[in-house]
Amino acid sequence: MLFMLLFSCTSTLQPDSGEMVRWIGKEELLAILANPALILLDARYGKDWKRSDRKIRNAERLDASEVDSWEGRYPLDQKIVIYCA
């Protein structure tokens, strides 16, 4: 499973062996946003997400404090981008 993290989250994701975690910048994210196979996850905490007027269209909001429950929820062969601020 390929995870790419855009910004630093307050929780730390620890990839299992065989997984690759890579940081990308906003320019690279903009270049792949049109890809229909992209899974985009907004991992901001509820209060931060609610207060923000900046949300990426088609991103699914998931609480970073519940990262352990994300396992098995997404296809292993798709590109996944998790972002938070």
Image (cartoon, helix red, strand yellow):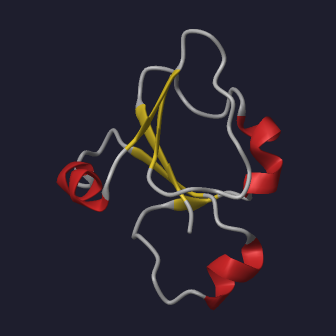
75 left or right, relative to 64: left
Tell me what residue is drawn at x 72 percent, y 38 percent: 70
Q: Position of residue 3 (x, y in %)?
A: 49, 34
Residue 66 x %, y %: 81, 49
Closer-to-camera residue (29/12): 12
Where is 53 relative to 39, above or below?
A: below
Q: Residue at x 44, y 53 (%)?
A: 6
Q: Residue furthest top?
A: 18
Q: Could you say where residue 30 lies in the image, as x and y percent from the top left?
A: 23, 59
Residue 16 versus residue 53 in the image, above or below? above
Could you tell whether 53 is left or right of 16 in the image?
Answer: left
Q: Does 47 sit above or below residue 71?
A: below
Residue 53: give x, y in percent of width and height. 50, 90
The quadrant holding residue 58 is bottom left
Q: Nearer the viewer, residue 10 or 83?
A: 10
Task: Locate residue 62: give its quadrant.
Answer: bottom right
Looking at this view, name the residue that lies furthest to the left.
31
- Asked whether, in this view, residue 59 is left or right of residue 43, the answer is left
Count of marks overlaid on the render: 0
Residue shown at 66% from the left, 34% from the top:
73
| Quarter of the image where the C terminus is located | bottom right
Would you place residue 70 above or below residue 49 in this image? above
